[in-house]
């Protein structure tokens, strides 16, 4: 069947069929509208397969040359937008193969020797996703660098640390941002890890059982940069763990983004007033002239929903599927594509936005002074003087009560009055009651003391190779 015939008969398997597919079924089953995005991977995979077929003497050298010439032209046609994608040809694979056969004749028809669309599509998605994984790894690096850049300016900027969103203890703004660097660093580790299992070659599995042609799978793997081959043909065509792993990476990363986005939104609100976001990331209101809304941060928070949803969709897609390939698997693409797009765009925009935030140090410090954030420090002070911590805790609660009655901070209570709470309170208590003293005291590894925070920053910079 020539490319034209394939075109006319509209189906790659037509001989057996006595009636054409209805228009509705055609539309329902076709994937070309979205899977054409895999075209580069499809061509690269086909070229590697063809080169191996020629090396093994399964097709001739002339066939290989024809296939290479045809594919070069198809590549140019797709790049320039001239390529005519046809719904009748169902998917990216059949569209490209039909055009190849139209261009180079029989050699095009030999390309599919020892191959099925089942191992072809699994190969294409892996190849495509591998490229995206590498791009996203770079974006995660940029995100971490943006956070580190701000953190470097703020190892001494004090803000309230929260638990239950109630003021808890003073932390530095840098320390707070570095918590997100940790999250994104773990996300990057997850990518490195999943890439290894993603980077294995399904081709050679053919439809499901392998093939009788003497294929050299290792050669194809080498040509395409795969680290190994899928070892069981049934698993090779049906496994979509790599999509699940990526989606779970994406969902976790977006959940991290959503937490950061939520904090940016809160911090920018009038009630916090800790930061400002550049105008280019905000929008106004059509009715309230005074409004500047942090839309980008809100959308980033909101978009985490669809990515988490895609993980649910994909994992449900796989549940209960019998071996081996089922058409269900065509449904893996749209959620995967959308997750890749959403994570990529979101990381890019969040990194830019974070790099440009305006930090309002005084407001942060004022907020830290409001909630008796150094109460634990006073309790620790008493415990150092020999009191059991539980008793110290109780005594400090009384001191806080007095502060609340007077509307002043612990550090502003006269020393004489503090002493009345316990005789071991002396003049050296004052540093423990200040925000800076409290910060400096938390020198434990991983703590918020500026010296530790600077050590964290240095560790991250060297990990990122900066
Ligand atoms: N478009 C199909 C997919 O995405 C390609 C594989 C089709 N294989 C088949 N036996 N119908 O899964």
Image (spheres, grey):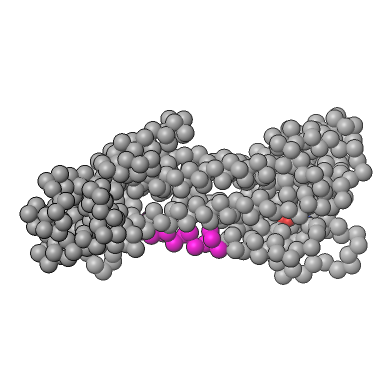
Q: Quadrant of the C terminus?
A: top left
Q: Nearer the viewer, residue 124 or 302?
A: 302
Relative horizontal placement of residue 296, taking residue 66 as reference (left or right): left
Report the predominant secondary structure element of the magenta stretch: helix
Q: Quadrant of residue 441?
A: top left
Residue 133's x, y, as percent? 58, 43
> Up-down: is 292 above or below 93?
below
Measuring 43% from the left and 57% from the top, which residue is drawn there?
258
Q: Nearer the viewer, residue 37 or 254?
A: 254
Q: Nearer the viewer, residue 463 or 271?
A: 463
Q: Which residues are magenta?
A: 293-309
> Up-down: is 418 above or below 361?
below
Residue 88's x, y, as percent? 74, 59
Residue 309's x, y, as percent? 55, 63
Measuring 79% from the left and 63% from the top, which residue is drawn there?
322
Measuring 54% from the left and 53% from the top, which residue is drawn there?
250
Measuring 18% from the left and 64% from the top, which residue is drawn there?
398
Q: Quadrant of residue 247?
A: bottom right
Q: Is residue 67 magenta?
A: no
Q: Does residue 356 appear in this view?
A: no
Q: Is residue 308 magenta?
A: yes
- Quarter of the picture for ligand 1? bottom right
Relative horizontal placement of residue 8, taking residue 149 as reference (left or right): right
Residue 384's x, y, as percent? 26, 47
Q: Does residue 144 appear in this view?
A: yes
């Amino acid at each position: 069947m020539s490319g034209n015939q394939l075109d006319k008969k509209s189906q790659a398997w037509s001989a057996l069929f006595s009636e054409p597919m209805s228009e509705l079924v055609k539309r329902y089953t076709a994937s070309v509208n979205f899977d054409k995005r895999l075209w580069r991977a499809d061509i690269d995979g086909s070229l590697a397969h063809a080169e191996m077929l020629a090396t093994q003497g399964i097709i001739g050298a002339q066939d290989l040359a024809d296939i290479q010439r045809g594919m070069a032209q198809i590549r140019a046609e797709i790049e320039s937008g001239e390529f005519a994608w046809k719904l009748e040809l169902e998917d990216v694979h059949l569209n490209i193969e039909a055009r190849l056969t139209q261009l180079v004749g029989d050699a095009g028809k030999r390309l599919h020797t020892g191959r099925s669309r089942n191992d072809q599509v699994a190969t294409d998605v892996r190849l495509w996703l591998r490229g995206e994984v590498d791009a996203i790894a770079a974006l995660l690096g940029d995100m971490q660098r943006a956070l580190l850049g701000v953190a470097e300016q703020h190892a001494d900027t004090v803000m309230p640390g929260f638990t239950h969103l109630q003021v808890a203890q003073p932390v530095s703004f840098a320390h707070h941002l570095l918590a997100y660097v940790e999250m994104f660093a773990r996300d990057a580790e997850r990518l490195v890890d999943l890439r290894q299992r993603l980077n294995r070659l399904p081709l050679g599995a053919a439809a499901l059982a392998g093939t009788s042609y003497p294929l050299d799978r290792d050669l194809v793997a080498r040509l395409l940069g795969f680290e190994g081959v899928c070892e069981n043909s049934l698993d090779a065509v049906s496994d979509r763990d790599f999509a699940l792993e990526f989606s779970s990476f994406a969902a976790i990363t977006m959940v991290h983004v959503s937490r950061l986005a939520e904090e940016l939104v809160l911090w920018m609100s009038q009630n916090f007033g800790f930061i400002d976001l550049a105008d280019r990331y905000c929008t106004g209101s059509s009715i309230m002239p005074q409004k500047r809304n942090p839309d980008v941060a809100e959308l980033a928070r909101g978009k985490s929903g669809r990515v988490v949803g895609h993980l649910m969709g994909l994992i449900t897609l796989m549940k209960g599927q019998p071996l081996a390939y089922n058409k269900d698997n065509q449904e893996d693409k749209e959620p995967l594509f959308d997750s890749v797009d959403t994570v990529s765009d979101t990381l890019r925009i969040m990194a830019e936005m974070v790099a440009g935030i305006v930090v309002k140090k005084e407001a942060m410090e004022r907020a830290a002074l409001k909630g008796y954030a150094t109460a634990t420090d006073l309790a620790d002070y008493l415990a150092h003087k020999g009191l059991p911590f539980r008793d110290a805790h109780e005594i400090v609660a009384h001191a806080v009560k007095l502060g609340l009655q007077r509307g002043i901070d612990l550090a502003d209570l006269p020393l004489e009055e503090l002493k009345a709470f316990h005789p071991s309170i002396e003049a050296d208590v004052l540093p423990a009651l200040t925000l800076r003293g409290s910060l400096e005291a938390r020198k434990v590894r991983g703590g918020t003391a500026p010296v530790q925070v600077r050590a964290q920053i240095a560790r991250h910079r060297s990990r990122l190779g900066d």
